Image (cartoon, grey):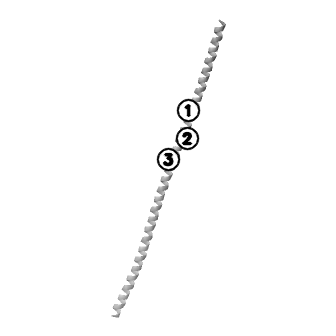
Amino acid sequence: QQRTDLVHKRTKLVQKKNHGWDLVQKRTDLVQQRTDLVQKKKQGWDLVQQRTDLVGKKKQGRDLVQKRTDLFQKKKQGWDLVQKRTDLVQKSTDLVQKRTNLVQKKKQ
């Protein structure tokens, strides 16, 4: 009987010890789950950052297009000024020709 009691007591101790190891394993599993969640959250933030960077690049691209448009507009304004100057020179030449013609007529 005494031996049976000792075996029974030993069995209970082993079961408690096993239960303790189960708790340790559960804790390890919980820590791993938490680590995985933190990693997923970090990956999510990385994706947000990538999207933000892409939006920034897209905006830079739009800014470059706007600069190019502005430069083209300035170039066009420059050509318009050249055209106006050419027109004024032509008018001036026409006036000189008319004056020359009038002077020629008066001489005759």
* Cα gap from disc 2 to disc 3, whole angstroms: 14 Å
As helix, strand or loop, the secondary structure at mark 3 comes to helix
Query: Which residue is depicted at the point 48% across and 58% down?
Result: 45
Residue type indicated by callout 2: Lys
The foreground one among 10 and 35 is: 35
Residue type indicated by callout 3: Lys
Query: Residue 76 got which mark?
Result: 1
On the image, the x and y values in percent for residue 67 come to 55, 40
The foreground one among 108 and 9 is: 108
Question: Which residue, given by chain and number where applicable, does mark 3 sit on?
Answer: 58
* Cα gap from disc 2 to disc 1, whole angstroms: 14 Å
Residue type indicated by callout 1: Lys
The crowding category of the residue bearing disc 1, from other C-alpha atoms within 10 Å (few below 14, some 14 to 19, many at least 20), is few
As helix, strand or loop, the secondary structure at mark 1 comes to helix
> Which quarter of the image is occupied by the C terminus?
top right
On the image, the x and y values in percent for residue 99 come to 64, 14
Query: Residue 67 got which mark?
Result: 2
The crowding category of the residue bearing disc 2, from other C-alpha atoms within 10 Å (few below 14, some 14 to 19, many at least 20), is few
